[in-house]
Image (cartoon, rainbow, N blue to C red):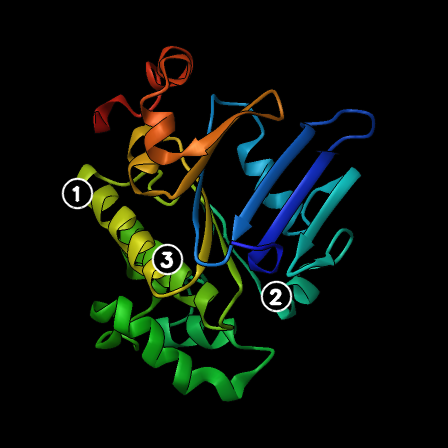
């Protein structure tokens, strides 16, 4: 792959929520066209903060973040969506009082003419939602809400999809389903960056992974390489995602 294949590049990023306190301390990341990138690490390592830094929810104090070669540092969420960045937070990720269809319409608020075309795309991946578009999102299970949130994020045909722990709080069966859907989204051509606490399962499906520790990328490699790295196993996989072993 060439530099033109790079969708997201993060270089030496320092970022945090409070003045003078950084959560990210020189984080680096590259996501190329069509890749599924997994980010794992212990609690407090800065995994979710990394996604929020890309999506403009955390102040970047140093370093650079580019999407398709253009800097996005300092841009607000609406501008980032126009630049092709989509973000699915871990919680509070649907409008519960709105129907599934209305949630998806919110996804193309900036380009409503795309609705029919993109609805065909997302219901091709999440077929079970296609017949329930009139159901209110607040009546859905946690796993179903996660599906709606992913669909809404995909409605603007993003260059990159950011997923913050898509399996969190789900039953084991629903977790497997969530990972399957993430793989299907990625196979449909969407570059995906996923933060996951279920480290083993994440590494099993991702093309490449980053192990974040104390706000830095401590290890990087293919999913298979990290799964079989003795240091990664000893330091991280012994306590992360053991249920997926």
Q: Indicate which label's residue lies in the foreground, 1 or 2.
A: 2
Question: Disc 1 and disc 2: Cα gap in Å?
Answer: 32 Å
Q: Residue at x 63, y 52 (%)?
A: 55
Direction from residue 206 to residue 27 in the image, left or right: right
Please tell me whether mark 1 sits on a helix, a strand or a loop: helix
- The residue to which callout 1 is attached is 173
Depth check, front residue: 26 or 122: 26
Position above or below: 111 against 56: below
Q: Residue at x 34, y 76 (%)?
A: 121
- The residue to which callout 3 is attached is 186
Where residue 6 sits in the image (x, y, percent)?
58, 55
Question: Disc 1 and disc 3: Cα gap in Å?
Answer: 20 Å
Tell me if residue 166 can be seen: yes
Depth check, front residue: 59 or 216: 216
Question: Disc 2 and disc 3: Cα gap in Å?
Answer: 18 Å
Quadrant assignment, res 82: bottom right
Quadrant assignment, res 227: top left
Direction from residue 84 to residue 244 in the image, left or right: left
Q: Indicate which label's residue lies in the foreground, 1 or 3.
A: 3
Q: Dot 1 surroundings within 10 Å: few (below 14), some, or many (20 or more)?
A: few
Where residue 122 sits in the image (x, y, percent)?
34, 71
- The residue to which callout 2 is attached is 81
Q: Residue at x 26, y 66 (%)?
A: 126
The C terminus lies in quadrant? top left
């Amino acid at each position: 792959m060439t530099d033109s294949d790079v969708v997201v590049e993060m270089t030496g990023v320092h970022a945090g929520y409070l003045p003078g306190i950084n959560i990210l301390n020189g984080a680096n990341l590259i996501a190329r066209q069509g890749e599924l990138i997994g980010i794992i690490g212990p609690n407090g390592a800065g995994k979710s903060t990394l996604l929020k830094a890309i999506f403009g929810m955390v102040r970047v104090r140093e370093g650079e973040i580019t999407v398709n070669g253009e800097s996005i540092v300092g841009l607000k969420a609406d501008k980032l969506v126009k630049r092709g960045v989509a973000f699915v937070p871990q919680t509070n990720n649907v409008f519960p009082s709105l129907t599934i269809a209305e949630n998806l319409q919110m996804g193309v608020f900036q380009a409503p003419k795309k609705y029919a075309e993109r609805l065909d795309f997302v219901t091709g991946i999440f077929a079970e939602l296609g017949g329930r578009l009139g159901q209110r999102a607040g009546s859905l299970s946690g796993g179903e809400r996660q599906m709606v949130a992913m669909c809404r994020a995909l409605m603007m045909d993003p260059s990159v999809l950011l997923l913050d722990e898509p399996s969190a709080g789900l039953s084991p069966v629903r977790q497997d389903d969530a990972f399957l859907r993430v793989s299907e989204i990625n196979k449909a051509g969407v570059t995906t960056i996923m933060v996951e606490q279920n480290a083993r399962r994440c590494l099993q499906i991702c093309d490449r992974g980053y192990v974040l520790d104390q706000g830095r990328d401590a290890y990087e490699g293919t999913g298979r390489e990290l799964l079989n790295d003795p240091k990664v196993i000893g330091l991280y996989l012994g306590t992360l995602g053991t249920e997926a072993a």
